[in-house]
Amino acid sequence: MSNDFSEFLKLIQPKLSFEESIHPSEPDYSDKYNWAATPDIEGQQFYVPDSEYKIKKNNDVDVFYIHPTGFYETSWNSDMDKTKSAYERTEIMLGNQASAFNGSCNIYAPEYRQATYFSFFDKEDNGKKALDLAYVRMRQANKIKATPKWANLEKIKEIYLNCPSGYHVDHIIPLNNPVVCGLHVEYNLQYLTAKENMKKSNKFDV
């Protein structure tokens, strides 16, 4: 590691341990403000190289995009303030990366409590804890993206409330699978024991 890069890491190294730090509150992904991109948000995900390319919305396919960290401050995690430079970098990544899908997909990108770049070089467990905090709410964001307007929310809530002790609510067709992605709807839910659910993970035999 070069001396210049080592000096850079010192500039963004948090002064307190993860446990001693005050952490940003959990984002609520039912609030559109906490998304960096959705089909309804006008943003850099709709960037096109020039006028020859047309912006296409209401595509048949959705893509769930999680941008890399662009947080270079001395807190372990970003507070998701959209007036700060970290969010400017989020917009740059939407334009440079996610926009490649805008001709064929509806882009959904949650903003999240990004871990500081220093986390990847931390030699203790502070960086790992910061990364865990950063991604812990991604499942909620993915569920919201996978919930169509016609889903029976009351029935879904009832299924979760009636889950037997020792069982998990599982998506029969996983929300995130390399081949097929299911919906968060009542008829895609089932009860599995904790062991069965962990074994199944996001697998699905087509």
Image (cartoon, rainbow, N blue to C red):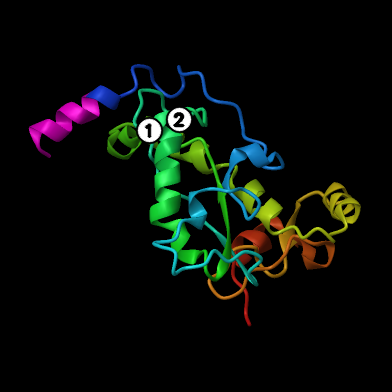
Q: Which mark is residue 77?
A: 2
Q: Is residue 125 visible?
A: no
Task: Identify residue for label 1.
Answer: 116
Q: Nearer the viewer, residue 76 or 88?
A: 88
Kindly indicate the quadrant of the structure image that contains residue 172: bottom right
- Residue type indicated by callout 2: Asn
Horizontal side of residue 37 vs 87, given as left or right? right
Residue 31 position within the rendered picture, expressed as x and y whole percent measured from the top left: 70, 39
In this picture, is 109 found above or below 99?
A: above
**Residue located 66% across and 51% down the image:** 40
Q: Crowding at label 2, few (<14), some or many (≥20) Cα neighbours within 10 Å? A: many
99 vs 105, left or right, is left
Does residue 46 lie above or below 31 as drawn? below
Which corner quadrant holds the N terminus?
top left
Q: Is residue 6 magenta?
A: yes
Kind of residue at badge 1: Thr
Give the residue drawn at x 9%, y 37%: 2
**Which image quarter holds the C terminus?**
bottom right
Residue 197: x, y in percent? 66, 61
